[in-house]
Image (tube, rainbow, N blue to C red):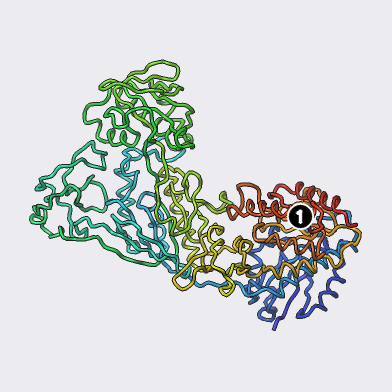
Amino acid sequence: MKKIAIFLCDCGNNLAEKIDFDLLESTLTTYEHVEKVFRFSLLCKKNKQELEHLKGKFTHLLIGACSERSSLTFTEDRIYQLLDYLEINRGHFESVNLREQCVWHHPKASREELTSKALDMFNIAYTKLLFNEKALDLPKFAEKVLVVGGGVAGLSASLNLAKMGIKTTLVEREKYLGGVASKVPFLWQSEGSYGFCTSECVLPVLARDVLFEEKVTPLLSTEIASIEKKQGNFKVTFLQKNNFVNPSLCISCGKCQEVCPVTTPNPFDFGLTQKKAIAKENFLLLPDTYSLDPENCTFCGECAQICPTKAIDLKAENQLSTDTFGALILATGFEAKLPPDISFEPNHPKIITFTQFERLAANRFFGRPPLSVVFVLCQKEHTGHCSRLCCTIAAKHAFRMASFFMGTETRVIYQDFKPIGRSGEFFYKQAQEKGVEFIKTRIKTIEGEEWLTLTTEEGEEIEADLVVMAEPLLPPEISFLKDLKLLTDEKNFPEEFQPKIIRPGESLVERVFLAGSARGIKDVQESIESGANAALKASFALQGKKQKYVSQIDLDKCSHCGLCVPICPHGAILSSKDTPFFIDPGFCKGCGLCVSSCPSRAINLKNLTDLQILEMAKKAFEHALPSEPKILAFLCYWCSYAAGDLVGPKKLELPLNTRTIRVRCSASLNPDLALEILTSGYADGVLIAGCPPKNCHHLWGNYLEDRRVKLLKGTLSTLGLPKESLRFEYIGVTLSDKLAKVLKSMSKNINLS
């Protein structure tokens, strides 16, 4: 049995001066299921405890006040807190935006006219409320987080999660922790620090803290074989490659290495040094254990025989394991590699990359520093984007070469030199003062054997015995992204959720977070900050969620066409052996893109169904002026609805016969519904407004709806509808003037005769 309470707030009597609240109250009291209408003057200033006497007495709540979207004091989140306190389900609530989208929209309207519009707005909200269902209430997800990547971002995320008491599994495909940073001997500390820190100091400390944290389970030499989304969680299968050395028994005594007969290039030093087939690639790497290289080992057994702790098992095999997690943090770092179409010999021993130079410098050039070194920057013409760190890295190297290898002539070739922050500028200026030459040009060719000649695009020649190329920093290929249904941008970085500026590290997929260079190229300090941020977000996300809007598939109507799967930008539509397609509510963001894409009408958006929209449209203009066109505007949840809220503050106004309905995404509205509204005479014009280009919260919803409306507009004349009666517009928060202009144009150009 519905028991509806209605809260009317006159905003310190400001709204009551424009709207007849007595008439509103007396009218609303007659609505079916309405138990009581409460009057407030400053509802936003009340503490929820002041309404304790109403707790548990009502099942539904309808509030007429300011905008839940744009109010600076009575926001949607605060209303949800009030609902929880009053023991009213979040799905059983609607609001009427009396201030921003009634009074403020029509500054010249009479009190009678504004009261008539207010009654229509209540009709719309009340009609929707009658059909509303309880909000989705998902309990806590699996209280365990998987961190993918053992670089500094992954270490930071893992450590912060553990400190919050959350069980964490850290998976890393290499044999050791630290990622790229472990190979860099000197790290700039921060954007504002002019000093260096050595990875030999900070990386063992950070890795050690993680390894000895009881809440963290590290899986080294491990890859993710598959990920399955299941009941809101992530079921992950791991493939752990065996290093043939038990880390719990190995004491790193090195006796196995001493007897090993096989010598092979050391990959940690990019082959600049040698190691044995069983070895520790660098003495400070963690875990502090040796590992065996099966590709070069002869399996002679000498190491196993001499090992004092019997840590070596030459018959060990790879292992598969499975675990379930409530959240994932992708800290997958970057790959540094030269593009395949460079115009010189990439394997030339005198031409190396920045990353190789780090190891060469770490080994102090093996006592033979170059006489002349040239750092060549920028490969963005090959990749289409700047790698961001290269200029500062070049400035760092140039500064150190000029400071500690004063007999080496150092030059930097650049196209656009953009060091990061104060520290980058400091290294750059200090290098210049110490005699480093920075030359703005492009290198066309590099020729020679022991002594190299670089030819610039101007035809000038530069000689050197070592050339160091800045390789592009690129996101790695991640095979399991397809399992997550996580989309990437044109540069292959995982897409973040909108608005990115205030939701950093949140991917398009629920409870998949991005850290470090998985979000875009970051330095060490930025990566550590990013890891901590992702850990905090993951900890909150495990607490479950209450969601008013969620899509649901009617399996009896579903034709199994699968069109909804690629439309969903959040990877929420899954399949199983028993069910071809279903929506996992744990991953659904309630955008509604699938609803309007389903040709069978088998998908409904809970609490904003097609039926609700039609019923709302039917009630929207009962008190409208008969002489003016009735314009119904469907405004997307965040951007265009907020633009509507800002019409008044920007001293604009809308036609009095405009009514607005807030939808989840512009593409959640099936344009066929708009046609039905028009042909049924519920409205004379329909505007669908979406986020501005490249800013849709649901990636491509605005583009999708724009195309649909353009296709449908060609059918308007055959239905006897004017061309102006259906429009789609991209309207961001700041484009209130555009919204006003479009609605005025529709009102002016739609001929009621």
Q: Residue at x 68, y 61 (%)?
A: 669
Viewer-nearest residue: 689 or 750: 750
> The C terminus appears in which quarter of the rendering?
bottom right
- Relative to 676, is 298 above or below? above
Viewer-nearest residue: 83 or 360: 360
- Residue lying at the far front in this picture: please name it: 718
Viewer-nearest residue: 641 or 54: 641
Q: In the rendered image, which quarter is residue 545 located in?
A: bottom right
- Residue lying at the far bottom in this picture: please name it: 1
Q: Is residue 686 left or right of residue 592?
A: right
SS of the residue at dot 1? Answer: strand
Q: In the rendered image, which quarter is residue 658 located in?
A: bottom right
> The N terminus appears in which quarter of the rendering?
bottom right
Which amino acid, by three-letter code, is at mark 1?
Leu
Whether residue 526 is visible: yes
Q: Is residue 355 left or right of residue 564?
A: left
Q: Which residue is mark 1?
A: 726
